[in-house]
Image: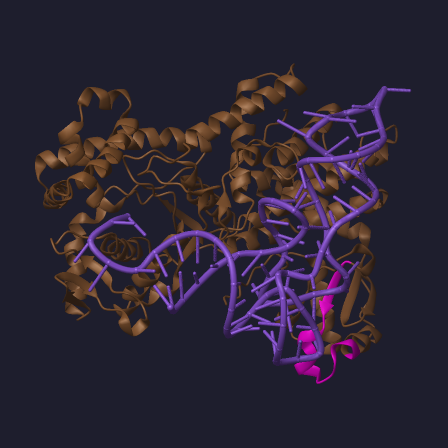
Chain colours: A brown, B purple
RNA sequence: GCGCCCGUAGCUCAGCAGGAUAGAGCGACGGUUUCCUAAACCGUAGGUCAGAGGUUCAAAUCCUCUCGGGCGUACCA
């Protein structure tokens, strides 16, 4: 485990003081305390807590006794108002006014930067995401990689990393032999211009139908791919044409989702380098011939062999992934590389990583397969080949249409409805996809995607818009020169504690590659705020109280905005 | 067969680098709008955390096994 010098807590003056006092009075190492210190589950228990379980070894006593003894030492003072043992926990209360002021002024001063950290500065993270196959439609099942990868991109960026987002397009491989063969048999340029992916896709489907009847087609396809790898001009021209048409279509969807890449170096990019990779694998004595194919035997590691070259000498995707990893390491010198790819490819990545390890590429330990579960229908999986697929575009369009309807019903006077409907509809789709843990399979459900109430993206967006509305109504500049002591409602305290936790949510989401952590954080923040909003007036006759509550509300607005932005979701000010 | 992943309320899921009393949302039922956006809020009902062992002061969380579902398992990606 990597211990960062800067964590979410290092900027916190209260934790610093607790750490200092524990070092001074009880001689407990700062690092130990920093790692352990946490927030108690409910407000009555204090503001911070030191669970004493881990101190058992140091003190040779049971945790309850340790907490009790530490509580009897005069640790309080300064900003720390009370120290209390609560079972095996040592709970600290701090000066509420100072805590409130610290949190709210920090958010106010840092604005869009609130939550950002520098722990990744000087380090590079590569994220390989989306990476769809050329010449096929983007289906809902392509959403996860794109949306998770894109969120991880922004989350890492917020932590100060240099991030390289790569769309490792599936633009190479046997399937292109199939496609080229199909096009030569049944395709036409006119039709292609009219509906590029539609035509390519049906050619692909037709190929598999026909190939069942006529196996010679498979042979023809393999030969075509072979020619492509050898650089045959005519074959290559067709391939390039398909690639350009596809990319143009893909970019429409990426634009709609607000997803960007630093490069589109797909599998084909490595074609010329492949021979070098294969040669070095041979030189290292790793590549052997088996059943006429070139493989790396991984039997020792309880894995099937890693296929490098087929009988007909054509390359395979493992070859290209090994090559790409080495190229990326040479080019970017990454400290972490994430492959956001479905869990059905787990074995593939284990094999690729193992081969790299055997090659002596010790940096492979910094590579991780960020796997995620399948998107399925109720009765089975989606398959492009069988034409069982829901188009991503269709999902986005439906969601936007639904957003439109709701706006017409609830806020017919809203300006630029189209724009807001798009932001909300797309936001709903992204949020839904991000809000389950990666590794779980998800069953595609129109009702879930088109639901805008409860734990959804629109709910968070709505809360944000509602806050914007309050700020508009207030209409004066927000100031930090307020009486912090006036914020004494329990929900106000809970909001402040939650705002303080935002940087921790970013770190947690990035570290575990689970954007769902940010989704949950935002839902919880919204939950507290909406309850507060429904029970208390923010703007009232009481000038001083209004100023304080406005500052608090503006901070919540700011954090919702920052959080949604990290997830790649727009933040309309009205909806 | 073997490997990996998942199994928490009727449904969908949080909670999982062990930690204080298992939480939301949807659906159901009942409430809240002369008031800053009701895409909201409040209340009621709903649990042997799949099952059985084990490790530990402490297990939904870690380990083992069983059951159920998914995925993968040499020339697709």
For residue A196, above or below residue A71: above
State whether residue A44 appears in this view.
yes
- A89 w.r.t. A113: above or below: below
Residue A126: where, in percent of width, then height?
38, 51
- The furthest residue to the right: A542
Image location (x, y in percent) of residue A446 = 53, 33
How many marks can you see? 0
| Left or right: A212, with A332 as reference point | left
Q: Would you say A335 lies left or right of A550 here?
A: left
Whether residue A202 sits left or right of residue A8 in the image: it is: left
Quarter holding residue A188: top left
Name the spot of residue B36 as percent of width and height, x first: 77, 25
Above or below for A511 versus A525: below
Q: Answer yes or no: is residue A479 visible.
A: no
Q: Residue A230 occupies which quadrant of the picture?
A: top left
**Residue occupying the point 15% across, 60% down:** A293
Q: Is residue A9 magenta?
A: no
Residue A501 against residue A464 in the figure, above or below: below
Is residue A59 rendered magenta in the image? Answer: yes
Q: Residue at x 9, y 34 (%)?
A: A234
What range of the chain is rendered magenta?
A: A47-65
In this rendered view, identify the residue nearer to me: B51 or A46.
B51
Residue lying furthest bottom in this view? A60
């Amino acid at each position: 485990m990597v211990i960062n010098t800067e964590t979410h807590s290092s900027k916190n003056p209260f934790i610093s003081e607790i750490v200092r006092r524990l070092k001074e009075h009880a001689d407990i190492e700062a690092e130990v305390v920093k790692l352990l210190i946490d927030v108690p589950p409910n407000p009555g228990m204090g503001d911070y807590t030191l669970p004493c379980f881990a101190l058992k070894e140091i003190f040779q006593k049971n945790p309850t006794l340790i907490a009790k003894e530490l509580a009897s030492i005069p640790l309080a003072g300064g900003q720390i108002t009370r120290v209390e043992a609560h079972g095996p926990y040592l709970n600290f209360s701090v000066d509420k006014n100072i805590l409130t002021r610290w949190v709210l002024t920090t958010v106010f001063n840092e604005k869009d930067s609130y939550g950002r950290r520098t722990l990744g500065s000087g380090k590079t993270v590569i994220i390989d995401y989306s990476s769809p196959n050329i010449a096929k439609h983007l289906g809902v099942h392509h959403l996860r990689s794109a949306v998770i990868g894109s969120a991880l991109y922004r989350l890492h960026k917020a932590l100060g990393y240099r991030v390289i987002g790569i769309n490792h397009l599936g633009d190479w491989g046997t399937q292109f032999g199939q496609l080229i063969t199909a096009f030569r048999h049944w395709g036409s340029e006119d039709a292609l211009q009219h509906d590029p992916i539609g035509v390519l896709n049906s050619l692909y489907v037709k190929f598999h139908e026909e190939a069942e009847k006529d196996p010679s087609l498979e042979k023809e396809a393999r030969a075509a791919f072979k020619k492509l790898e050898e650089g045959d001009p005519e074959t290559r021209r067709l391939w390039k044409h398909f690639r350009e048409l596809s990319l143009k279509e893909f970019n429409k969807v990426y634009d709609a989702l607000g997803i960007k890449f630093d490069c589109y170096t797909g599998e084909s990019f490595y074609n010329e380098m492949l021979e070098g990779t294969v040669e070095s694998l041979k030189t290292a004595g790793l590549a052997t011939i088996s059943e006429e194919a070139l493989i790396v035997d991984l039997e020792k590691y309880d894995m099937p062999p890693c296929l490098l070259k087929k009988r007909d000498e054509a390359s395979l995707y493992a070859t290209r992934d090994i090559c790409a990893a080495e190229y990326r390491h040479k080019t970017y010198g990454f400290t972490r590389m994430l492959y956001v790819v479905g869990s059905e490819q787990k074995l593939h990545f284990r094999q690729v990583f193992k081969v790299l390890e055997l090659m002596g590429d010790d940096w492979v330990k910094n590579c991780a397969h960020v796997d995620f579960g399948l998107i399925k229908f109720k009765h089975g999986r989606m398959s492009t080949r069988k034409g069982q697929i829901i188009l991503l575009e269709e999902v986005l369009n439906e969601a936007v249409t639904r957003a439109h309807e709701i706006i017409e019903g609830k806020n017919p006077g809203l300006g630029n409805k189209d724009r807001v409907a798009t932001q909300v509809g797309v936001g709903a789709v992204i949020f839904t996809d991000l809000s389950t843990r990666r590794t779980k399979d998800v069953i595609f459900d129109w009702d879930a995607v088109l639901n805008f109430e409860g734990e959804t993206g629109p709910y968070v967006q709505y809360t944000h818009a509602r806050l914007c509305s309050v700020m508009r109504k207030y209409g004066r500049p927000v100031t930090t020169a307020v009486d912090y002591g006036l914020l004494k409602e329990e929900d106000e305290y809970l909001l402040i504690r939650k705002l303080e936790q935002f940087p921790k949510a970013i770190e947690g989401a990035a570290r575990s590659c689970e954007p769902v952590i940010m989704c949950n954080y935002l839902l919880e923040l919204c939950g507290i705020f909406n309850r507060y909003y429904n029970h208390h007036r923010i703007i009232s006759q009481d000038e001083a109280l209004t100023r304080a509550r406005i500052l608090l509300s503006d901070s919540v607005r700011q954090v919702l905005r920052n959080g949604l932005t990290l997830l790649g979701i727009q933040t309309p000010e009205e909806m």
